[in-house]
Amino acid sequence: MLVLFETAAGYAIFKVLDEQKLQQVDSLWKEFETPEKANKVVKLKHFEKFQDTTEALAAATAMVEGKLGKSLKKVLKKVVAKEAHEQLAITDVKLGGVIKEKLNLSCVHSPAVAELMRGIRNQMEGLITGLPAREISAMSLGLAHSLSRYKLKFSPDKVDTMIVQAISLLDDLDKELNNYIMRCREWYGWHFPELGKIITDNLAYCKSVRKIGDRTNVASMELSDILPEEIEAEVKLAAEISMGTEVSEEDIANIMHLCDQVIEITEYRSQLYDYLKNRMMAIAPNLTVMVGELVGARLISHAGSLLNLAKHPASTVQILGAEKALFRALKTRRDTPKYGLIYHASLVGQTTAKNKGKISRMLAAKSALAIRYDALGEDTNAEMGVENRAKLEARLRYLEEKGIRRISGSGKALARADKYQHKSDVKVYDPSGDSTLPTVSKKRKIEEVEEGEEKEKPVEAKAKKVKREAPTEEEAETETPKKKKKKEKKKAEEESKPEEEERAISPAEEMTKKKKKEKKRAAEEEPKEEVEEAAVSPAEEVRTMMPNAIIFCFINPNVFFFLLQTTEKKKKKKKKVKEDE
């Protein structure tokens, strides 16, 4: 068996002396502990040295790409073709397939071969004679530097550092331009304040100031190459009646110099934007189609590089740039942000506020695929980005139209649907089904107790009923203060008498009393009916008695309740007088 071994100095071909030792993979490393042991296992058959670093670089790049270089082809034809019956051990399977195709040589790659290569690399200085260690190390270092340079030069379009620097410079220029234009407007506004309101475009304003100078020159100046005719006429009219102050020529010269700076920076900014657009289309064409040049460049700048951005999932791409809001939301346990830098993309901007979250999520998912395709794919076309953008636009149209279309007919017109109003039926728990006992209200219980007491004391209850009867209006009018005093005395005497009599009355006397009371009841029922007919409500009685007091009652309600109480007291007293009589 022959072994192909690549070094920085050249190609080496070894012959395996004892192939049985390759079967013991785990203990093969012991055979390469010393150069003497290694020489018993393998023997150098041929060494093809590189002439210079360029040849070494060409051979190394061919090996990396899995291709068969010119120098390797020569070596294999010269040495291995003589012993075509033997197998060739190699490290790269892809390279083995190419060798077998072109030179019709059988190649071997296995764990034993990998362990053998490791042992040869370990004892390379002892196995390859005529090549000092210092020269091998120098060749290795030179090849490493030249290979790194080659990789950078090979694909300069894939260098995303230029994009990061360009977008950062563009943002800085925008800030500086805003400051300069604000200063220019404020400075020249002291001399000609009306011009700032008439001309809103910053570049046109600076060009106009640069051309006009002093406002007295406006009448004889033509601004048709900068401004439209209507605005030019308005500027000339405003210059005649301007309220600005007079300034010296030195002030005007400094203002004009500032205007020159603004114009130059604006032109450089437009040039830088074109450069950034071209670089984005070269490095990330699919991402540029999806979100635009500026948003794509800001995403790359925020992540650090295109490869770092490709490692982010779609959810991270969606909120990239809103980290502060995300951590604040997590800390306060509120809703997390729906979008970051991707909010400025044209697809998100043209949607309604209701659908911005959905579109930003879908756009982030498709953009993540586009970024990975741009960073790791071999093609540089933007077909995938165009296809995904078309899908997103179709989805956006569907969301905007709410997806409601007529099933029959042309299918173009939207179906008429009434506005949905949700009416929730809240069912309340009924506790009446929990208990089987009959429920009796407190009022009813109190009424039953009172009825029982009335049955026990019918005399007292009837007396109370008589007291509650309302007196007539005529009696209320004829009452005098002297009679009131007499009635109060009689009332006190009558209340004390029945209590004494009840204590001393025997059962026989009670029967006689009952008969008397029954007779009294029959006599009282007739005047009661007359009293009920003549009874009037307390409020009406107050109106008849005191017509002027009603007006006062609306002002002070306490007076109204006081009058009602007094009328009721008078009625009770009259009833007692009647009973006595």
Image: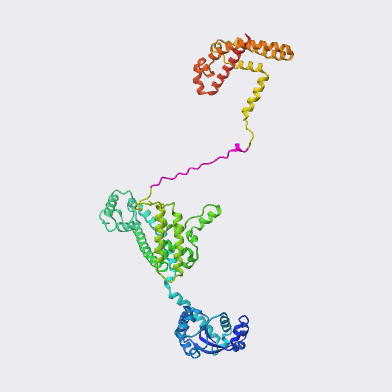
Q: Nearer the viewer, residue 580 or 555?
A: 580
Whether residue 433 appears in magenta in the rendering, the answer is yes
What type of secondary structure mainly makes up the magenta span? Answer: loop
Q: Nearer the viewer, residue 261 or 463?
A: 463
Q: Which quadrant of the figure contains the C terminus?
A: top right
Relative to 173, 537 lies left or right: right
Whether residue 158 appears in magenta in the rendering, the answer is no
Query: Up-down: is 106 above or below 189?
Result: below
Q: Nearer the viewer, residue 119 or 418?
A: 418
Which residues, given as a range, are shown in magenta?
416-434
- Image spot of residue 308 (x, y percent): 49, 66
Q: Which quadrant of the figure contains the N terminus?
A: bottom right
Query: Up-down: is 435 above or below 495?
Result: below
Whether residue 237 is visible, yes or no, is yes
- Image spot of residue 336 (x, y percent): 51, 54
Q: Give the quarter of the image for residue 488.
A: top right
- Image spot of residue 303 (x, y percent): 48, 64
How many marks the image carries: the answer is 0
Extreme residue in the top direction: 581
Whether residue 179 is visible, yes or no, is no
- Image spot of residue 7 (x, y percent): 52, 83
